[in-house]
C-alpha cells in the first residue's frame, strides 16, 4: 500500500451560502484559484475546471460550508455497492 494514486474527478463543489461567513479561507487555500469571494461576501465557484479535488477547501472551511462531490474515488460508495468500488479502483489511470 505504498503509492495511492487515486484521481478523483470533481463533479460539483457545493457551497452552502447560509453556512458561509465569508472568511475567505477557502479562497486563500485553493491552489487552483477555483474559488472566489462574491459581492455578497460569500465564496463561490468561479472555475471548477481547475479543481484538482484536493479537498483543502472542504477541510479548511471552519463552518463546514463546502462539500465536494466527486466521481470515482471516495472510500464510501454512494450506492454502497462493493462492485462499484472495485470498478472505481480499477478505472484509475
Ligand atoms: S472557508 Fe467556508 S466560511 Fe470561509 S469563505 Fe470559504 S466557504 Fe465561506
Ligand atoms: S478541492 Fe482543492 S482545488 Fe478544488 S476548490 Fe477545493 S481547494 Fe480548490
Image: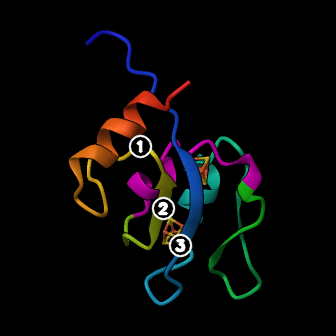
Above/below status of 67 relative to 77: below
Q: Left or right: 10 with respect to 78?
A: right
The one nearer the camera, 76 or 90, is: 90
Distance of mark 3 from mark 2, alpha carbons?
8 Å
Q: Residue at x 66, y 48 (%)?
A: 51
Which numbered tag is attached to residue 14?
Answer: 3
* Label 2: which secondary element: strand
* Label 3: which secondary element: strand
Q: Is disc 1 surrounded by few (<14), some (14 to 19) or many (20+) residues within 10 Å?
A: some
Q: Residue at x 22, y 46 (%)?
A: 82
Q: Residue at x 71, y 58 (%)?
A: 48
Residue identified by numbered label 2: 69
- Residue 59 appearing in the image: yes
Q: Which numbered disc, 1 or 3, marks the residue closer to the eye? A: 1
- Say which label, 3 or 2, has the lower sequence index: 3
Which numbered tag is attached to residue 62?
Answer: none
What percent of the width, then of the height, locates residue 40? Answer: 70, 88
Q: Left or right: 42 with respect to 18?
A: right
Residue identified by numbered label 1: 73
Distance of mark 1 from mark 2, alpha carbons?
10 Å
Amino acid at each position: 500500500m505504498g503509492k495511492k494514486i487515486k484521481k478523483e474527478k470533481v463533479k460539483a463543489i457545493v457551497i452552502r451560502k447560509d453556512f458561509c461567513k465569508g472568511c475567505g479561507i477557502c479562497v486563500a487555500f485553493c491552489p487552483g484559484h477555483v474559488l472566489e469571494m462574491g459581492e455578497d461576501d460569500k465564496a463561490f465557484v468561479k472555475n471548477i475546471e481547475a479543481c484538482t479535488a484536493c479537498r483543502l477547501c472542504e477541510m479548511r472551511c471552519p463552518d463546514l460550508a463546502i462539500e465536494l462531490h466527486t466521481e470515482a474515488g471516495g472510500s464510501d460508495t454512494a450506492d454502497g455497492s462493493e462492485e462499484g468500488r472495485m470498478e472505481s479502483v480499477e478505472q484509475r489511470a
